[in-house]
Image (tube, helix red, strand yellow):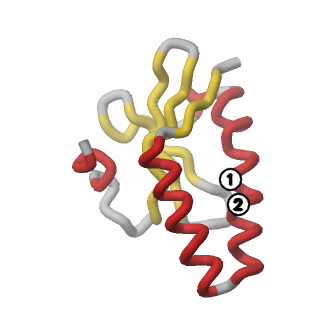
Amino acid sequence: MFTVIITPQAQDDIASVLEWYELEAPGIAAQFAGELTTLPGRVAAAPRQFPVIRKSARRALLDRFPYFVVLRIVDMEVHILACLHNRRDPRHWQRRG
């Protein structure tokens, strides 16, 4: 089993999404947070199930929300690099440095 590490940039992305949902539809924010709590287990169990989107970066779609996370496998760790809306330019996370 892999260890999942959520980077500070991904944590910021998630906080922004939660803040937006909290303002727009508070009940939905809790549902989004709930789905995010299941994601590390899915990713840790089989990170190679997610398609490669660029070099070694992979994309994992959320089930109920129009968001995806970008992840990278490093040894026995999975680093979650970003959490982005499906309509967002998927290269956005690359420009953050």
The picture places residue 38, in percent across and down from the top left corner, at: 75, 46
From the image, which quarter does the C terminus lie in?
top left
Residue 56 placement: quadrant: top left
Reply above or below: 4 against 12: above
**Where residue 36 is drawn, which disc sits there?**
1
Q: Is residue 55 left or right of residue 61?
A: left
Alpha carbon of mark 2 to alpha carbon of mark 1: how far? 5 Å
| Residue type highlighted by circle 1 | Leu
From the image, which quarter does the N terminus lie in?
top right
In the image shown, does 32 or 66 lie closer to the viewer?
Answer: 32
Mark 2 burial class by Cα count in 10 Å: few <14, some 14-19, many 20+ = some
Residue 23 placement: quadrant: bottom right
- Residue at which label 2 appears: 33
Which residue is pictured at 50% across the width and 31% down the height? 79
The picture places residue 21, in percent across and down from the top left corner, at: 61, 77
| Residue type highlighted by circle 2 | Ala
Which residue is pictured at 46% across the width and 19% down the height? 74
**Where residue 60 is drawn, which disc sits there?**
none
| Element assignment for label 1 | helix
Mark 1 burial class by Cα count in 10 Å: few <14, some 14-19, many 20+ = some
Residue 77 placement: quadrant: top right
Q: Are marks 2 and 1 in contact (CB under 8 Å)?
A: yes
